[in-house]
Image: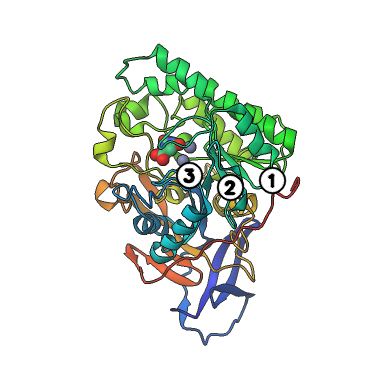
Amino acid sequence: MIESILFRDMSLVTALGLRHADVLVEDGKIKTIGWDLPQNVELIVEDSGLLLLPGCIDPHVHFRDPGLTHKEDLESGSRAAASGGVTTFFDMPNTRPSATSPQTIAEKKRLASQKSLVNYNFYIGATEDNLDDCLACENIPGIKIFMGSSTGDLMIKDPKVLERFFATGSRLIAVHAEDEAMIAENKARFEGSRDVTDHSRIRSSEAALSATRLAVSLAQRYMHRLHICHLTSQEEASFLANLETEGLISTEVSPQHLLLSSPSVYDKWGTMGQINPPIREARHGQALWRALKAGTIACIATDHAPHTLEEKALGYPHAHSGMPGVEHALPLMLTLVNQNKCSLVDVVRWMSTHPANAFGIDKKGRIEEGYDADLILVDMNAKKIIKRDHIVSKCGWSAFEGHRLHGLPIATFVNGQMVYREGDFFTQIKGKEARILAPWEGHA
Ligand code: DOR
Ligand code: ZN
Ligand code: ZN
């Protein structure tokens, strides 16, 4: 274990801007930021070509542990995260068994304490009869509600039950917002289709907007803190832009919904491009990008949803929906910085500071004295083409294969310990449970 590190003469990127300084890390925390700091440390990191950023917080991954570990597990998923500069993740409840009780959450936290290289926490999944369990569960990012069916069997169909979740307690609710009735109607229209491009027609933008509107109306009626997962449509983005949602409603977008579009994703990748909610026409990605830049969308989340190549090759509609992403989100965004499409400060806000704020994560998401030393070193000149052989995730593929990355995380520190450096993992280090404050008490 490293007890102290001095990052000497570094360029720091924070949500407030760029800054030059020394950073002293002691006992897992950022102790001092300044000049001429003590040099009697265990490790000195000094490289004027590199940038120091707060580690990314990915509030939406599916690491499949327990029960579906042939796709991913907390060890492989956390390695993929560490290699992509992600130092904290929130995992979704559609594992096996589904994480729907304090006991299943406790078991996931136990597994993570033994297997995860990075920090972690776990959503509890809502069912039609576990509201009390959801409220009893301590220190979690929130309650995940599938408003439409997706991978696994978690869903709340009954509108009265849905309303009860919003009417009760004050725990953050995160929704997968797709209108199940509209999807079912569309499915009937496309009955028998083997054409994966119909996936985007069946899971239409109207179905997404309808569920998003319903979730927002319930959040507003009960003043209940709502996080809308993976926004996918221009219509949802304009709907949210026109609302007064400050502090009450937050949302996230995934790199695949920003950067890939239909029909080309299906032409190139077939059912590997099949995800819920689906990748839509280019106008949606463009609108999501504008909404992210305008602040309507607060966070980038990967919705890392690995399935094996065999499961993806089953043909439409049997192929499993979802694609991996946790290891490439930051490099994809850094590549956009190098293309002058956004700034490093934007990236730090979207991938560190805003997720920490949205979920009230204690002492993370910033390079500030007293904060956890979850830090990454980034080389903005490094280049790499995404290739199947290099994929860290157990699923072993990516819909971004062939993509040219320009700007890479090259080392990852979690609680002041180096867990990743240029392809090597230090797996004896384990992450910790992220502490969640309660930003949603009332109208934060
Ligand atoms: O495409 C998806 N895959 N959407 C989800 O909502 C779930 C996810 C998964 O777990 O595979
Ligand atoms: Zn989802
Ligand atoms: Zn998901």
Res 131 → quadrant: top right
> What is the distance, in whole Å, between disc 3 and disc 2 at their CAs?
39 Å
Image height of 300 relative to 205, above or below: below
One can see residue 409 in this view: no
Residue 19: % across, % down:
61, 64
Which residue is the site of mark 3?
336
Which residue is the site of mark 1?
169
Confirm or deny contact between disc 3 and disc 2 (CB under 8 A): no
Confirm or deny contact between disc 1 and disc 2 (CB under 8 A): yes
Residue 372: % across, % down:
57, 68
> What is the distance, in whole Å, between disc 1 and disc 3 at their CAs?
40 Å
Residue 221: % across, % down:
74, 33
State the residue in front, 303 or 167: 167
Residue type highlighted by circle 3? Leu
Identity of the residue drawn at 36% across and 21% down: 197
Mark 1 and mark 2 lie on one chain; the one further toward the N terminus is 2
Q: Is residue 171 left or right of residue 69?
A: right
Which residue is the site of mark 2?
134
